Image: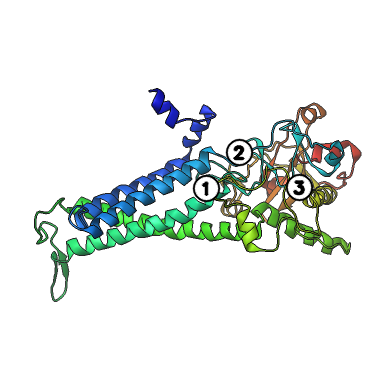
Amino acid sequence: MSFLFAIVKFENLHEVKRLCHWGPVIALSVIAICSTMAILDSIIWYWPLDTTGGSVNFIMLINWTVLILYNYFNAMFVGPGYIPLEWKPENSQDSVYLQFCRVCQGYKAPRSHHCRKCNRCVMKMDHHCPWINNCCGHLNHAYFTSFLLLAPLGCLHAAFIFTMTMYTQLYDRISFGWSSVKIDMSAVKRMHNPIMPFSVPAFAATLFALGLALGTTIAVGMLFFIQMKVIFRNKTSIEAWIEEKARDRIQYYQTGEEFVFPYDLGSWWENFKQVFTWSGVPEGDGVEWPVHEKCHQHTLTIEQLKQKADKRVRSIQYRVVEDYNGACCPIGKGLRTFLRTPCTEEPRICLTRGEVLFATRGTKWWMYGDKVLSEEQTKTGVRIRGWFPRRCVEKCLYDTANNSTTSEEKKDN
């Protein structure tokens, strides 16, 4: 038993609960179905003990499954790396360049962001992935990307096995008539010592697994190319959004500034080595990073502070005129509101008539903003923000967005 615990060891046992989520359940189910059906069809189509080719095919199939699960579980349980609670920079003067997180009661290190799902500030956060029920960030970026590469390759191999199995098993069972094509599933393929019968349920299961494998190849393959773009530019999806907003801010105010993204080292190979290393441990400690020669450690954090200040200035105050229960797709708020619900995991917030909000962005039918809370709630770090139907609010006739009494309430984590 002690030997088993030495092999299977989690630094934090509560991390196992990440498996109890729809994302890992679906992902592991797809892996299990494709792997199991591929192994069974390999036995039917290309018995591994008869030929060298069959043995190689079977070993490769097992190898794909092991590598996929290894990188998947590492991406999930190693995690992205978190900024310590109540973290402060070594040089106290640098704190003026950093945002303060009220939830973690500490400063956000460069490239870190607070994840509402994980409830922690994440090192070099790219996004929160529901399929691993964890964030993709500094420590697990290589494992996550490797999983995105291996899963389509393994599914392509499985799809080839499914196709060849159906072809070889149905070849002698198909009869063509003048106006019809018949498949006699009761006939046994003419072969010596069939290992397993290829019945109607087996055919249906193989066809289902083939569709699953091809769908996974396309979907996960697209995610892989997106992540490689992130790695080659050394720019997370969040940082790409910050850079875009920086250019919009400079153009809007005509400041004449030149914004240079600090973490692109100028070479795709150098950027690649920041994530993939021979040791498996990424470069850096998750707090300090190599930067472009025209930049310094706080170039991006200073830009973030400018954008936060700009958002507070440009936010608009609204008053709630219609109650809303926080439903993702509210039927009672109109058909267009129902159909145009934001496709995001960001929360919806309940509204009660008379409440006040500050909206910072939105669409034609939905808005995103923060509720104005009491002073006691603000001091305890409570913050309520999310999406709500536009029809439930109306713009206030007076603008108090710059009022000193509410400016603290609108500060971001």
Of the numbered discs 1 and 2, the one sitting upstream in the chain is 2
Residue at figure coordinates x 19%, y 63% from the top left? 168
Which SS class for mark 2? loop
Marks 1 and 2, Cα distance to the nearest angstrom? 20 Å
Q: In the image, is 174 to the left or to the right of 386?
A: left
Q: Is residue 192 above or below residue 286?
A: below
- Asked if the residue under mark 3 is in contact with the one under mark 1, i.e. CB atoms within 8 Å, the reply is no
Q: Quadrant of residue 157?
A: bottom left
Residue at figure coordinates x 25%, y 63% from the top left? 164
Of the numbered discs 1 and 3, the one sitting upstream in the chain is 1
Marks 2 and 3, Cα distance to the nearest angstrom? 22 Å
Q: In the image, is 29 to the left or to the right of 18?
A: left
Of the numbered discs 2 and 3, the one sitting upstream in the chain is 2
Q: Is residue 62 above or below residue 351?
A: below
Q: Residue furthest top?
A: 1
Q: Quadrant of the N terminus?
A: top left
Task: Residue under label 2, please give it.
Answer: 117
Badge 3 local density, few (<14 within 10 Å), some, or many (20+)? many
Amino acid type, residue under disc 2 in the picture: Lys
Q: Position of residue 33 (x, y in %)?
A: 33, 47
Q: Position of residue 291 (x, y in %)?
A: 75, 54
Task: Residue under label 1, please give it.
Answer: 143
Q: Position of residue 282 (x, y in %)?
A: 61, 47
Badge 1 local density, few (<14 within 10 Å), some, or many (20+)? many
* Front residue of 290 and 341: 290
Q: In the image, is 15 to the left or to the right of 153?
A: right
Q: Is residue 379 above or below residue 32?
A: above
Q: Quadrant of residue 4?
A: top left
* Front residue of 64 and 393: 64
Amino acid type, residue under disc 1 in the picture: Tyr
